Image: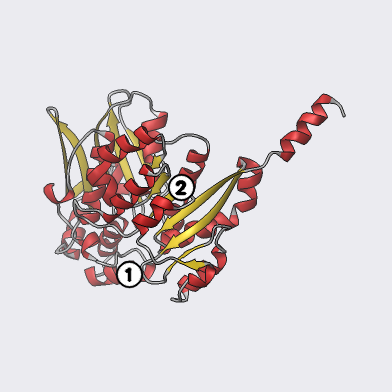
């Protein structure tokens, strides 16, 4: 066989790298990520040399299961969405997630348990257990990143493992990849953003003449409203994201409960329409900036002139306007994101780790 032919044959025979994945959390995002792995399985093998097997799933209501050969994800999704136990997909797991993660034969942990706004983070315990035992971590959980970013980043570097968190802000839009990987040495000086889709949608509904209650019900019907509506309506979600951006991109040490926060609860259709009549739009704006050497953040209801980039962010869309020392202004927007876009952030982080890009 000619040398070139032998090389091509050898290339075809290279086995894909197998990644054994533990899913901690199997809600809407986790199930969509599982669907994505099933849909893209052949492409991952062919185009990226990657074979992704989920070997354990931990859920809050549907049991916990492991299968070293890889869990049947179609079956697991079907059972969970039927509100049934997933434990028939393998062996039931009866030990706490933190203990299991430490000893499991896996190399990636995906932490997508529900957000908790508090210094004490069980999710952070999961991440520390994973990193300490040599496992990469991917998360869309804002809690451990906003409260413990410096510690987790240092641990990941010390252990030589990946720590990626693109799905924590703006779903699948490449916020952290953009500012930490692509825009080398560009120092973020300030940002302002519409970061909570639910609040933006409800304000838009009131602008169109509907009531606050109509907007809340519409958000619930579309699946955007948090299980605890206060997370959206009282500004907590936007506050967490504002602090996360300042802490990761600007070196802050801010806590969501310690910054000025204004939700949309109490905003009336009359106020929204009055602003519109004056050529302005009422928006919930998250901000981060430097005050001397101190990093500050806030979330407030503001009247924006219609020519402002954020004024045109409608419905469930979100947007982020960033100023750096190298670029005057950079605007990132994602139109009407959903669960799939957040799941894509996990998927893209998986590819990054597979390619050796361990941190953004």
- Label disc, if present, on residue 74 of the rendered structure: none
For residue 89, above or below residue 290: below
Give the x, y percent position of residue 93. Answer: 43, 65
* Residue in front for this viewpoint, 247 or 24: 24
Q: Could you classify mark 1 by the number of other residues whose Cα lies within 10 Å: few (under 14), some (14-19), or many (20 or more)?
A: some
Question: Mark 2 falls on what kind of element?
Answer: strand
Judging by the rendered image, the residue that carries numbered circle 1 is 220
Judging by the rendered image, the residue that carries numbered circle 2 is 108
* Residue in front for this viewpoint, 47 or 276: 47
Circles 2 and 1 in contact, beta carbons < 8 Å: no
* Residue in front for this viewpoint, 338 or 20: 20
Give the x, y percent position of residue 8. Answer: 77, 33
> How far, Cα to Cα, is label 2 from label 1?
33 Å
Does residue 321 appear to the left or right of 90 in the view shown? Answer: left
Mark 2 or 1: the one toward you = 2
User: Which quadrant holds residue 148?
Assistant: top left
Give the x, y percent position of residue 130. Answer: 38, 47
Q: Is residue 290 visible?
A: yes
For residue 284, above or below residue 250: below
Q: Quadrant of the C terminus?
A: top left
* Residue in front for this viewpoint, 348 or 163: 163
Identified at 27% across, 55% down, the residue is 122
Residue at far right of view: 1
User: Which quadrant holds residue 94?
Assistant: bottom left
Identified at 47% across, 50% down, the residue is 344
Does residue 145 appear to the left or right of 41 in the view shown? Answer: left
Identified at 44% across, 59% down, the residue is 30
Question: Mark 1 falls on what kind of element?
Answer: helix
Q: Could you classify mark 2 by the number of other residues whose Cα lies within 10 Å: few (under 14), some (14-19), or many (20 or more)?
A: many
Does residue 242 appear to the left or right of 186 in the view shown? Answer: left
Please tell me which of labels 2 and 1 falls first in the chain.
Answer: 2
């Amino acid at each position: 066989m000619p040398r070139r032919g032998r090389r091509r044959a050898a290339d075809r025979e290279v086995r894909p790298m197998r990644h054994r994945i533990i899913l901690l959390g199997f809600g809407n995002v986790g199930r969509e990520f599982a669907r994505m792995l099933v849909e893209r399985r052949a492409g991952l093998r062919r185009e990226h040399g990657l074979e992704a097997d989920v070997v354990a799933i931990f859920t809050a209501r549907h049991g916990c299961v492991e299968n070293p050969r890889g869990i049947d994800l179609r079956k697991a999704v079907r059972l969970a969405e039927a509100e049934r136990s997933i434990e028939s997909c393998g062996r039931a797991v009866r030990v706490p997630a933190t203990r299991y993660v430490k000893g499991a034969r896996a190399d990636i942990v995906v932490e997508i348990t529900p957000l908790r706004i508090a210094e004490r983070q069980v999710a952070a315990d999961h991440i520390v257990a994973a990193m300490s035992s040599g496992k990469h971590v991917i998360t869309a959980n804002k809690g451990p990143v906003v409260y413990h970013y410096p510690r987790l980043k240092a641990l990941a570097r010390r252990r030589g493992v990946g720590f990626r968190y693109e799905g924590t802000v703006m779903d699948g839009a490449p916020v952290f990849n953009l500012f930490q990987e692509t825009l080398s040495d560009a120092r973020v000086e300030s940002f302002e953003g519409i970061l909570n889709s639910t609040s933006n949608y409800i304000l838009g509904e009131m602008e169109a003449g509907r009531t606050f209650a109509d907007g809340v019900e519409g958000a619930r019907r579309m699946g955007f409203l948090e299980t605890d509506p206060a997370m959206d309506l009282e500004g907590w979600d936007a506050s967490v994201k504002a602090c996360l951006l300042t802490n990761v991109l600007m070196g802050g040490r801010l806590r969501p409960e310690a910054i000025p926060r204004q939700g949309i609860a109490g905003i009336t259709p009359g106020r929204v329409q009055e602003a519109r009549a004056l050529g302005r739009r009422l928006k919930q704006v998250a901000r981060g900036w430097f005050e001397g050497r101190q990093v500050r953040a806030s979330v407030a209801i503001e009247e924006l002139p219609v020519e402002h980039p954020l004024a045109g962010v409608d419905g469930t869309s979100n947007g982020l306007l960033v100023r750096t020392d190298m670029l005057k202004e950079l605007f990132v927007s994602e139109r009407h994101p959903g669960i799939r876009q957040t799941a894509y952030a996990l998927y893209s982080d998986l590819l990054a780790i597979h390619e050796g890009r361990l941190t953004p």
